[in-house]
Image (tube, helix red, strand yellow):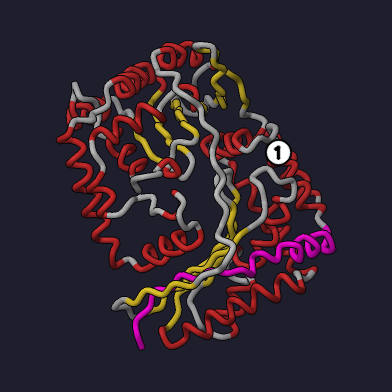
Amino acid sequence: MKKIILTILILGQILMAATIQHIDVNGLKIPLIFENDKRLPIVNMQFVFTNAGSIRDIDKAGLAKLSARVMNEGTKKMGSSAFAQALETKAISISSSTGRETFVMEVSSLKEEFDDALGYFDMLLEDPNTTPQTIQKVKTITIGSLSAKENDFDYVASNQLKSIMFENTPLANPSLGTIKSIKSITPEDINNFIKTNLVSSKLIIVAGGDIEISQLKKKLSKIISKMAVGTKTELKHYDVVKTPKTKTLYKDTKQAYMYFGSPYNMDENDSDYYKARVATFILGAGGFGSRLMEEIRVKKGLAYSAYARISVNKSCSYFSGYLQTKIDSLDEAKQTTVQTISEFVKNGVTKDELEQTKKFILGSEPLRVESMSQRLSRTFMEYYKGHKLGYSLKELQKIKKLKLSELNKFIKKHTEIQKLSFSIVTAKK
């Protein structure tokens, strides 16, 4: 017990190393999540644009990710090769990527090269390489990648589940897009996406390393002041379909791929999220020892692995899981999944399951914040979800004190996870 308390205290000190401040530019207060770390002469920075990820692919699936790939092609003036070579010479890294809700541009370099790194980053923001030739090259590479994924049945089944659960919404589209949608994207689409989403009104900055915050603010203010302010739009929330569906796709495969999902009635800043975290770990996120793994693999030998998790975000909240099984065992695996989840909701968990889960979560948590990148990421999520700094530490304390009766009451309340939709890829018998 003393070790657990000591661990939590140390974790609290680590988490408090990151701070949230603001940069005042053009009448905006740009959030800056920062940690000073002098152990290595390195600086890392991210420009995170909110409501700018694949959720913005309203008309053309894959537009956000394709735009990020174009932003990795350097500037018009220098071109892709010269820009990449200039960065490599100074060991500077600049990259762009997207998630469901965010578009992220990351810069990292040695401390002594950080001014040059910001200079190249500023050039990229002002003059991205959106020439028709570059965009066509990126489209060709993307289409090739999508063609290869046609036989990746995990990818196919996962995307099919999203199309079922979020039918007629942007979340139903694969974030990488489809061959058809990628072909339809024009240079004008890319330019409009960048112009609309890479704006200061959507910006949150995450930075850390061997640099003083006062210096960083001055350097970043010059870059932000040249950016378009744009319009900050509210992120729309999409619900899972109310009526469960099952869709089966027949392919030439030796295994059956089964993905399943259901609604999860919880907001991103729900005070009971820690209970959901514990419950889902016991049901399917904990690997060996979890209910699904025990029932499906250990007891019946129907699959090599079986997992389940929850996704609770601003744009959507849902429960999902997956497994692979023999084609002849598909029906039994599906039935076992349904029964296991139903019994979990009905009967809850045991005292031993709760205590073992507490030990794992509390014991492994410090490993999740041992690097500066992990700590900054955690602080960003606290801020992004509307929590105060250090909320993750309080959540650990709640998990430590969680009673069996409280957890089982919570589990029995979430009957909606039984409304399972299934996406199946298999071969005809």
Residue 413 is inside the magenta segment: yes
Residue 266 appears left or right of 30 = right
- Residue 157 point in image, percent of width and height: 41, 67
Residue 70 appears left or right of 107 = left
Whether residue 308 is visible: yes
Question: For the point 68% across and 42% down, which residue is it?
Answer: 269
Question: For the point 25% across and 29% down, which residue is it?
Answer: 74
Range of residues picked out in magenta: 403-429
When the figure is inspected, residue 25 is found, relative to residue 55, above or below; the finding is above
Whether residue 214 is visible: no
How crowded is the residue under tag 1: few (<14 C-alpha within 10 Å), some, or many (20+)?
Answer: some
When the figure is inspected, residue 330 is found, relative to residue 19, above or below; the finding is below
Q: Quadrant of residue 123?
A: top left
Q: How many marks?
A: 1
- Residue 46 point in image, percent of width and height: 45, 30
Q: Which residue is mark 1?
A: 391
Q: Name, please, the residue furthest toward the left.
A: 133
- Residue 87 point in image, percent of width and height: 27, 27
Question: Which quadrant is the C terminus positioned in?
Answer: bottom left
Question: For the point 22% across and 45% down, which residue is it?
Answer: 139
Q: Quadrant of residue 117?
A: top left
Residue 392 is inside the magenta segment: no
- Residue 306 point in image, percent of width and height: 53, 71
Question: For the point 26% across and 48% down, which residue is it?
Answer: 182
Instruction: Classify mark 1: helix, strand or loop.
Output: helix
Closer to us: 363 or 172 = 172
* Residue type of the residue flagged with mark 1: Tyr
Closer to us: 38 or 92 = 92
